[in-house]
Amino acid sequence: MHAPFMKNIPIALIYSRLLIGFAIVLLSIFQVTHYVVLAIVLLSVGLLTDVFDGIIARKLNISSEKLRRLDSSIDQVFFISVAVATYIQCPDFFKSNLAKLIVLGAFELSTYVLSYIKFKKEIATHSIGAKIWTLILFATLVEIIVHCESVVLFELCLWIGLATRLEILAIVFTLKKWTNDVPSIYHAVKLRQGKEIRRNKLFNG
């Protein structure tokens, strides 16, 4: 394999997630046969691209601010697309949990607003807590796609989502300058103090 081709793999994985999200929406709109299976497979593939784009970029030493910002933004579009597709299939779940979803959405939006106000850039903290929440969100979406309902898992997703959004707000508030890949508020405090932080080469950086 030629080096230039290898360097394009991470960005291809990132943009593939965009296409996967739109594909799930289209499958939902057209009520295709075996939608549940197809949606879960595509959602799983999308999650895997999210895991491996960063790992491959770091392995190739091409992880950059631009790439991490792009990754973060497309993650948002991907999960919003899946949520829209799931709403089309299971509107009653969303209607019965509307207040909770609005609160969660407001907290998510607030992280971007604060980052834009303070740094004129979107967030790309990729914190450990946010990564854990992504896995719980994935499991919750799968349950809703299959059963059009989720109780315990949704509550777990809600509260961990709120907790991790609060941590991201604290990270953004603490940082003196915009920084991507900040594992936790502890690391943000160290950065504010001018200290070096250690990042896991597999998950951050």
Image: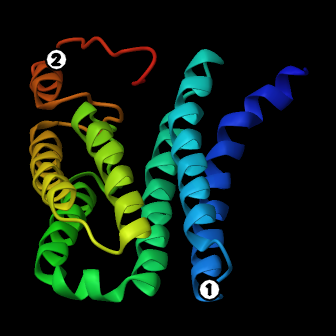
- Determine which residue is flagged by label 1: 31
- Residue found at x 29% / y 47%: 136
Query: Residue 194 shows which numbered tag?
Result: 2
- Residue found at x 71% / y 45%: 12
Q: Of the residues shown, which amino acid type is indicated by label 2?
A: Gly
Instruction: Count numbered badges in the picture.
Output: 2
* Marks 1 & 2, CB-CB < 8 Å contact: no
Residue 60 higher or lower than 15, as above or below:
above
Q: Residue furthest right?
A: 1
- Label 1 sits on a secondary structure element that is loop
- Residue found at x 35% / y 43%: 135
Q: Residues within 10 Å of mark 2 (few under 14, many from 20)?
A: few
Which quadrant holds residue 197?
A: top left
Q: Of the residues shown, which amino acid type is indicated by label 1?
A: Gln
Where residue 137 appears, as percent x and y from the top left, is: 32, 53
Q: Residues within 10 Å of mark 1 (few under 14, many from 20)?
A: few
Q: Nearer the viewer, residue 141 or 57?
A: 141
